[in-house]
Amino acid sequence: MTVLEKGNITIHTENIFPIIKKSLYSAHEIFLRELVSNAVDAIEKLKMVSYAGEFDGDTDHPKIVIKADKDNKTLSISDNGIGMTADEVKKYINQVAFSSAEEFVQKYSGGADQPIIGHFGLGFYSSFIVAKTVEIDTLSYKEGSEAVHWICDGSPEFELTESDRQDVGTTITLTLQDEETEYLESPRIRQLVKTYCDFMPVPIEFEGEILNEQPAIWRKSPSNLTDEDYLEFYRYLYPFQEEPLLWVHLKTDYPFEINGILYFPKLKPDVDVTKGNIKLFCNHVFVSDHCEEIVPQFLMPMRGVIDSPDIPLNVSRSALQVDRKVRKIADFIAKKVADRLKELYKEDKPQYLKCWKDLGTFVKFGYINDEKFKKQIEDLIIYKTTADLSAGDSDSANVQVETEGDAWQDVNADGGISQNGESYTTLAEYLERNKERHENRVYYCSDAVTQATYVELHKNQGLEVLFLDSFIDTHFISYLERDHSDVKFSRVDSELDENLVSGDSDSEIVDPNTNKTRSEQVKELFETALNKPKLTIRTESLKGDNAQASPPAMVLLPEAMRRLRDMTALLQQEQSDFPEEHILVVNTAHPMIQNLANIAQGGIVTSEGSPSSELANLICHHVYDLALMSQKGFDADGMKQFINRSNQVLTQLTDAAK
Ligand SMILES: Nc1ncnc2c1ncn2[C@@H]1O[C@H](COP(=O)(O)OP(=O)(O)OP(=O)(O)O)[C@@H](O)[C@H]1O
């Protein structure tokens, strides 16, 4: 064997490799990704040379072959790519590859506290992370080239000799360090190829089998892809999951290159929205499962792939977050998502509504967090409403039933979308529809169950109520108010405005015996019976055609006070307790309250009072409990008292009827 050259690799540090190894402790496995991507590059380069007419050999059967030899502890990666001449080995391997080593060490010997997103740019010398000796056997495509063999044991010394290789291409052979022999195990190799190289555009063979199968469909043009292609790809990436709601194909070359497909999955309540599920690639090569820095936070629940050579991968995560290009990429992604939502809203309202139920929260989160995104989607935010915005003829209602909810009565004159008896509207449409009745005022409900009575009351008065009942809405409303400073948002249980109470009524007539009005008597009755200094008792006569249908009493939580409490609770991450200070509105128009006043007539209820005043006392408690019940549940003690009292009331009533 003729030694062509012996020499020193030009680096200043005597033995750089232990340092590389240490600084990459957690990511030894990436060496395979680096070597296979070099092989892919070499194959692509040979194709380009062939197109240019400089090579007339076979480029139609590109292939990378991985071989493990347990006896000799060697792992080799062969390609039929461009190959290297002796000069190129000297230039690219000895100088170029190693020249940045020093810089690398300076940058990364800091260690694990600065996690590097992809450990990219390590290239060839990452093989020394796991190998004690690295050999290159290569023959260049160039006519007249001679095959060469290069060997290096991790010290800065190398040896270059002739080789008897016959085929154009390169084989890199690693003799693994004793503690790295896991990379000779078949399952480990298969797993690594699947993880990192699955979408590489060249077949990768191992043990006679091609391990990578999927074409990187995100690099194709959307016009060449069908819905089924997108869905199939999703199923491949996330097997055994529900179908995604919608997807966005990212594709641009300028001012940065980015390809990718992002899917909005159907969200599960237990989804961890802080943890990303998007796979980051760089030119087909898998880099990381974490894209937190690149994708705007409110889009974190999205899944799919982002492939961009423009994301700097060899910097720390914190540096990445402030990188201008990365910020632009994040904006681009947000805009694409907004465009997709806009398109869906315009073109396919049924699908939009279906998605909205899952995505609404995240769109609102985006509204709160990203000014630009807000501007793009503010007109697309819809709210469930008590108004019936369906066209309303019975024929189409029948059609809806028959098609199990996929038939639609589209936008009616008042705007909005309606499906299966549920209507949705935008804020602008709501304000427009109600401007004559209550200009710039929005009635909303934040919990359809506990506020059902109040919603009913509004509905009965023909007042439209919007549902703002997702967990983000408390926060979201304050942003809405900031952006619509002329609009007042009142929760249905916060106050009873003039739309709900009738002004003058019989209750205001003064009783000559007591010199008090009926409503004053009722108020006093409740105050004495309940004896709660922090509770404010108010009497109102609630409007309604049927006095019995409206509630006898309601608990109100003034908007400003309630919000303050909600906010504090949100910040402290706990449920807000039901405040002791609240208002009990007693409906003097209700027949039961009128009866109650009659029962108690003749005296203020006292503990030793007459049987009828005792009953009145019990009923006051009961009315209060019933009003409270629609706002909050009972604790054990409250429940016991409530049941005891119910039994007492019923006993007294049955006694009276005997
Ligand atoms: N399998 C191969 N076939 C032909 N040339 C190769 C092969 N592997 C490496 N080279 C040459 O060696 C050079 C250095 O490789 P190295 O992997 O260190 O850096 P790179 O591929 O240029 O960039 P990166 O650091 O991003 O991988 C390559 O640019 C290429 O010219």
Image (cartoon, rainbow, N blue to C red):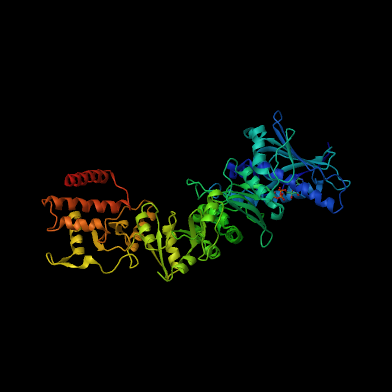
Task: Please tell me in which quadrant of the rendered image residue 469 appears.
Answer: bottom left
**Residue drawn at (78%, 50%) of the image:** 45
**Residue drawn at (86%, 48%) of the image:** 142
- In the displayed structure image, the side of residue 299 where residue 585 appears, left or right: left
Across and down, in percent, residue 655 comes to 17, 44
Please say if 176 is above or below 98. above
Q: Which of these two is toward me, 540 or 471? A: 540
**Residue drawn at (17%, 55%) of the image:** 599
Task: Please tell me in which quadrant of the rendered image residue 643 appears.
Answer: top left
Q: Which of these two is toward me, 73 or 422? A: 422
Quadrant of the image for the C terminus?
A: top left
Q: Which of these two is toward me, 541 or 266? A: 541
- In the displayed structure image, the side of residue 121 where residue 376 appears, left or right: left
Across and down, in percent, residue 424 comes to 49, 59
**Residue drawn at (69%, 31%) of the image:** 73
Across and down, in percent, residue 354 comes to 54, 53
Q: Is residue 532 visible?
A: no
Across and down, in percent, residue 531 comes to 19, 55
Q: Which of these two is toward me, 157 or 231? A: 231
Q: Is residue 209 visible?
A: yes
Quadrant of the image for the N terminus?
A: top right
